[in-house]
Image (cartoon, rainbow, N blue to C red):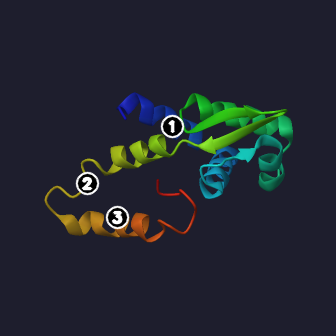
Amino acid sequence: MDERQALLAFAALAQETRLRLLRHLVTAGPEGVAAGTLASEAGVSASNVSFHLKELEQAGLVASRREGRSIIYKAAYPALSGLIAFLMKDCCQGRPEVCTPAVTALTSGCGTQAGACA
């Protein structure tokens, strides 16, 4: 991930509803969630959720697919991993104790959600 891509991702996440939607998608796993279900879970209208998901998709943080009459959205785990790697790339500077808490937090949650750390 380059700086421009990271800026697009952070801009998309700098809005409460979009951050909430992405967090729902991350916990949903690789199967994803139908837009209507996601709207209900996040407590927003269907038109509102569509607008915000479009912004997240343009930033590369979510992907969508059509299943019958539904659009299924899922978190783009490689892009999210790239964003985390972008932030952590220059971490430590020869001092692993600086990054240890972040790495521990990331790895301790792996396996608790299906595909959440894939």
The percent coordinates of residue 12 (x first, y second) are 58, 37
Q: Hey, which quadrant is residue 35 in on the image?
A: top right
Helix, strand or loop under label 3: helix
Pointer 1 or 2: first along the chain? 1
The percent coordinates of residue 41 (x first, y second) are 79, 55
- In the picture, the disc for residue 9 is 1
- Please give the residue where the numbered disc 3 appears in the rendered image: 103
Viewer-closest of 70 and 5: 70
Please tell me whether residue 14 is drawn above or below residue 57 in the rendered image: below
Viewer-closest of 26 and 20: 26
Helix, strand or loop under label 1: helix
Q: CA distance from mark 1 to mark 3?
A: 21 Å
| Residue 14 in sight here | no
- In the picture, the disc for residue 66 is none
What amino acid type is highlighted by mark number 3? Answer: Val
Q: Hey, which quadrant is residue 75 in on the image?
A: top right
Within 10 Å of the Cα at label 3, are there few (<14), some (14-19), or many (20+) other Cα atoms?
few
Pointer 1 or 3: first along the chain? 1
Helix, strand or loop under label 2: loop
- Please give the residue where the numbered disc 2 appears in the rendered image: 91
Q: CA distance from mark 1 to mark 2?
A: 20 Å
The percent coordinates of residue 62 (x first, y second) are 59, 38
What amino acid type is highlighted by mark number 2? Answer: Cys
What amino acid type is highlighted by mark number 1? Answer: Ala
Q: 89 left or right of 1?
A: left
Please tell me whether residue 99 is drawn above or below residue 43 in the rendered image: below
Q: CA distance from mark 2 to mark 3?
A: 11 Å
Viewer-closest of 41 and 30: 30
Tell me which residue sits at (20%, 65%) in the image: 96
Pointer 2 or 3: first along the chain? 2
Please say if the residues under marks 2 and 3 sit with CB atoms less than 8 Å apart.
no
Within 10 Å of the Cα at label 2, are there few (<14), some (14-19), or many (20+) other Cα atoms?
few
